[in-house]
Image (cartoon, rainbow, N blue to C red):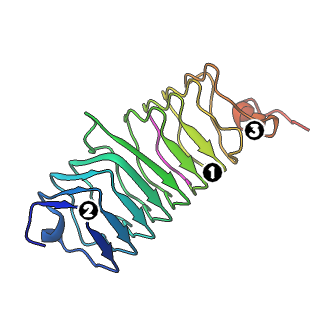
């Protein structure tokens, strides 16, 4: 991969190295079963790209731009998204492993997390306005000073969110999820 701009490319079973990614722009590209664990993302742009079954476990994604990107069945265990380009970005996750990921202080408005494992994810100071958490395991996820107005937690489970430490106006929860909103009060809910 020598070009700095790659358009309409398909990558299958590629183990990307550091030099394969740095300072590159990928537009309308599709990645299948690729491994990015050896990469440190610097000045990398992904525009209208799709990733399927890719491994980003422990990857450093500093200064990466994600615009119109869909991740499906990808592993993002222990990835810190805090340094992603926030100017114009949109990315969503479906059937992904996001355990221990960090979204600290990011604007994640309308982001979709569908069928994801999100154990111990850090959402401190994040803007999750109108975000959708569809059937996600949020055990030990950290919500402190988060804005989750109109966020949809209806089908997600195992979360603990303190309504006094987060903005939750018009957020949607199921009655089964009330325990996670009231946990600090040590109530017995039947």
Sequence-first tag of 2 and 1: 2
Residue 152 sits above or below residue 5 on the image = above
> Which label is found at residue 8?
2
> Which label is found at residue 73?
none
Picture coordinates of residue 33 (x, y %)? 40, 75
Residue 117 sits above or below residue 88 on the image = below
Sequence-first tag of 2 and 3: 2
Prevailing secondary structure class for the magenta stretch in the rendered image: loop
Q: Nearer the viewer, mark 2 or mark 3?
A: 2
Q: Which residues are magenta?
A: 118-124
- Residue occupying the far front of the picture: 8
Magenta segment: does it hold 119? yes
Labelled pair 2, 3 in contact (Cβ < 8 Å): no
Q: Residues within 10 Å of mark 1 (few under 14, many from 20)?
A: many
Picture coordinates of residue 165 (x, y %)? 55, 24
> Which label is found at residue 177?
3
Label 1 sits on residue:
136
Disc 1 on helix, strand or loop? loop
- State how far apart marks 2 and 1 are (Cα): 32 Å
> Residue at (27%, 55%) from the top-left corner?
61
Magenta segment: does it hold 63? no
Picture coordinates of residue 107 (x, y %)? 38, 32
């Amino acid at each position: 991969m020598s070009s700095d701009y790659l358009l309409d490319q398909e990558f299958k079973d590629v183990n990307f190295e550091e030099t394969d990614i740095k300072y590159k722009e990928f537009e309308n590209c599709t990645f299948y079963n690729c491994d990015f664990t050896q990469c440190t993302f610097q000045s990398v742009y992904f525009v209208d790209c799709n990733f399927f079954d890719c491994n980003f476990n422990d990857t450093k994604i500093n200064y990466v731009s994600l615009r119109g990107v869909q991740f499906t069945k990808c592993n993002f265990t222990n990835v810190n998204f805090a340094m992603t380009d926030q100017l114009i970005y949109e990315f969503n996750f479906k059937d992904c492993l996001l355990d221990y990921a960090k979204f600290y202080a990011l604007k994640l408005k309308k982001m979709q997390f569908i069928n994801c494992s999100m154990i111990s994810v850090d959402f401190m100071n994040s803007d999750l306005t109108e975000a959708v958490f569809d059937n996600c395991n949020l055990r030990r996820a950290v919500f402190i000073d988060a804005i989750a107005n109109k966020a949809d937690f209806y089908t997600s489970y195992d979360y603990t969110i303190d309504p006094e430490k987060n903005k939750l106006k018009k957020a949607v929860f199921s009655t089964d999820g009330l325990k996670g909103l009231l946990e600090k009060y040590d109530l017995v809910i039947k």
